[in-house]
Amino acid sequence: MNDLGSNAGDSYHPPADSFPEPDPVRALPSGSLVEIRTRKPQFPVGDELQSYLRRYQRSEAFDVVYDDLLRFTESIPRKTPDGEDSYWEVVLYSPGDTEELHRELTRIYAYMKTPEDPSFTNHLVIERVEFCRFGNSKPFRIKVVNRYNDNHDYYYVKSTDASRAYGLELEHILAPNRINFLVHGSTLIEEHITGIPGDTFLTGGVPTDARSLTRVAKEFVKFSERSFAKLLGDMRAYNYVIVLTQDFDMAQYRVRAIDFDQQSYEGDLRIYLPQFYKENRAAVDIVWRNLPPETIRQYQKEERSLMARRLDASRERVDALLTCMSNDAISTPDRVEQLAADLARYHRDSGFETLRDMGRLTRRHLLKMLRRLDPT
């Protein structure tokens, strides 16, 4: 995992004149941990970003929008499989609204899966709509069932936020994951990302054998590296999932982000480093108990190399996205100034201090991390 004072290329331990924590992932003083205390405001999708989304088939008009789903007449708390209260509640609509909403929600799901031919809706039904009052986006979760075989899937309807759109798109392009999402006005449609919630995994699902623990540690290092390179913040344990794949002779793991609200918003550089959250302490312990520093450096380099290849394959698209971000207001001037100063210290590059928007900061940091911009 990255230290705040390390050089993005090779050095692992921070220099003495850099950030004060000598070893920020092994033994952090309690005052070094970060905590997000204020809710991030939502930023509208401007004309330039909307044009980008249309260009790359991320935009589609549909009849049901987020505000329509808020017209529910009743809600029922939903329990977890263990009988505990959850953040979700099942919402009910009037009979007239239910038929109309379900028809359009089915069409949206079909278009998201196969935009070339979204006609396969006759065998799909909406089993339920759930609402979560927790979090910035206050999402609706839609359960879609195939009536022929009872197989089901989920997707989400959220209020649009430009930060989330930028985060989703950067994840789609630069991470080893593909994400389907659509934006229409004030509404964002986002596919469900399957996996074990990070907090559930860390409190009861961690394997015990040495080989599996090493693979888990490796994936947390790579996940941390991706989050930091993309400046995706707030990767606390409940904002990512663990994807478990059974290979022929072992179990493979992958850590995937599921929340993209904090894309290039905060000023404190530690916000973008998952090891600085108390919720991830168990993951940090797994890394340090199973990987020596030289192996951590190896996995960091591997992940940066893979990201660099993805960047080279989609350079025009990334450039268009970051240009939109550079012309967009997705943070506050004080946060931009603080992050510019932190990145200047991290990279030993005073050029960051001349930048006054999150798009240019993200671009310069990303290119330096992936060795696509020469150190200055």
Image: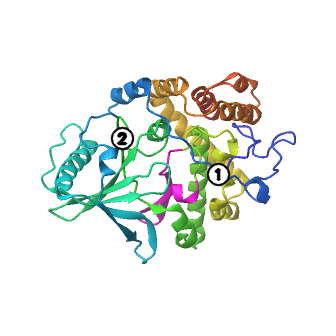
x and y, in percent, of residue 302 in the image: 59, 44
Query: For this rendering, which residue is in front, 332 or 115?
Result: 332
Q: Quick check: 24 above or below 181?
A: below
Residue 77 image label = none
Relative to 348, 145 lies left or right = left
2 or 1: tag closer to the N-terminus: 1
x and y, in percent, of residue 292 in the image: 71, 57
Type of the residue with mark 2: Thr
Relative to 7, 164 lies left or right = left
Secondary structure beneath dot 1 equals loop
* Residue 254 visible to an observer of this rendering: no
Secondary structure beneath dot 2 equals strand
In the orientation shown, which residue stands out farthest toward the front? 73
Asked if residue 30 is among those painted magenta in the image, a careful observer would answer no
* Residue 39 visible to an observer of this rendering: yes
In the orientation shown, which residue stands out farthest toward the left? 122
Query: For this rendering, which residue is in front, 95 or 10?
Result: 95
Query: For this rendering, which residue is in front, 307 or 112?
Result: 112
Q: Quick check: 45 above or below 16?
A: above
Query: For this rendering, which residue is in front, 200 or 137?
Result: 137
Relative to 271, 19 lies left or right = right
* Mark 1 burial class by Cα count in 10 Å: few <14, some 14-19, many 20+: few
In the orientation shown, which residue stands out farthest toward the bottom? 83
Q: Quick check: 202 above or below 5?
A: below
| Residue contact at pointers 2 and 1, CB within 8 angstroms | no
Residue indicated by mark 2: 187
Which image quarter: residue 371? Answer: top right
x and y, in percent, of residue 34 in the image: 69, 52
Query: What range of the chain is rendered magenta?
Result: 236-261
Residue indicated by mark 1: 37
Type of the residue with mark 1: Arg
